[in-house]
Image: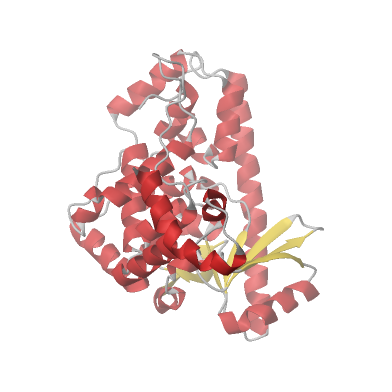
Amino acid sequence: MKYLPEVELLLLCARPRTDESVAHRIAELLQQKPDWESLFRLADYYRTIPKLAMHLHHQPADLLPGAIQSALQARHRDTTRHNLVLSLEILRLVDLLATEGIAVVPFKGPVSAMVVYGDMAMRACGDIDLLVKRDDHRRAERILETDGYAVEQRYEEAMQSTLWRESSGISIDLHWGIPPARLRLDAERFRDDLRPVNVLGRPVLTFSPRDTLLVTAVNAVKEFWKPSLHHLSDIASLTADYTDDDWAAAFDRAGETGCRRMLATAVLFAHRMLDITLPSAGPGRLFVNPGINRAVDELQAHLFPQEPDATDGSVMRTFHLRDAQRYYLILTDSWWRRTRDWLGWVVKPNAADQAFVALPGKLSFLYFFIRPIRLLIKRL
């Protein structure tokens, strides 16, 4: 698959390590004088400035001009400062909620950066993510409101509320579960294996490295219309030294928590984009599953705009999945739940069925028969 030079450079630099062939390709792309403004904009959007700075730091001056090197390092410093501010606030909020008897698990963001890289500066972070028990969620909201935060929205599907503090410009996602809600991941299982991680010299309990992999995989693929490169980069780094036993344990744990298909989808996605090695241990059949491959096709199509096809000038994109319901059917582990949800999707009428044929109210029950017929005609 052919990408713009700036996109290819970003993908190569998103890998945790570079061998000789990758380093040579990076040098070739730099010799083509990439559009640095476009590259920086992409790296900011996909939160990969730290990886870009790491891989380009030692490039010769004729490939990486001093002004570009300075601009890149300045952006990296800004990322580090922002992560430091978030980390200080995480420590303060953990203490604040603990004094009220609320057990909170910080995850993602700077905390995950410490788990994955041992260095918070290696991951660009947006906000703070905190997990509390559902019974504690509203009380935790009120405590944060008293502290100066304001609830902006509550998302049932994301199992979280978003809070904003104007004075500090910090946003908190206060979770009572691991989204998306429709996949019914067992968030309480993740609490069974919390581990301390060093955040600014203090131990903070968060998900174990294995569970961090699972949560990262879920976040990498939970929305096919908005896939994330930085989560793929985290997956590549977390699994760079994985053995067969590590992979087997990861997929066993994914089975316990209900995200085996999401883990397989994320790993296959990372394989395609960052060339990680597919594990030989675990459910290998999932990597050749037609549905999961269609899901990865969709993720790949949405991750980056591709160059126009040389023959007809059209953009090379293939969309297999038109709605979130069909996508989540593929990612659901339970076969009976997939069957039930599929039957519900096939039978339950919607606006498209009503537009297909107009029926008076007394005959509206016929839409339950019209819908499968319409879907069959559409399929044919």
The one nearer the camera, 11 or 343, is 343
Quadrant housing residue 149? bottom right
| Residue 200 percent across, percent down from the top left | 57, 61
Question: 243 above or below 176?
Answer: above
Visual colour scheme: secondary structure
Q: Residue at x 27, y 63 (%)?
A: 251
Is 101 displayed left or right of 118 in the figure?
right
The one nearer the camera, 82 or 306, is 306
Question: 268 above or below 26?
Answer: below
Of all residues, the one furthest to the bottom in this rendering is 101
Asked whether residue 347 appears in the rendered view, the answer is yes
Is 275 displayed left or right of 54 in the figure?
left
| Residue 268 percent across, percent down from the top left | 31, 47
The one nearer the camera, 21 or 129, is 129
Tell me the quarter of the image containing the N terminus. top left
Question: 15 above or below 184?
Answer: above
The one nearer the camera, 237 or 225, is 225
Q: Residue at x 26, y 54 (%)?
A: 242
Quadrant housing residue 338? bottom left
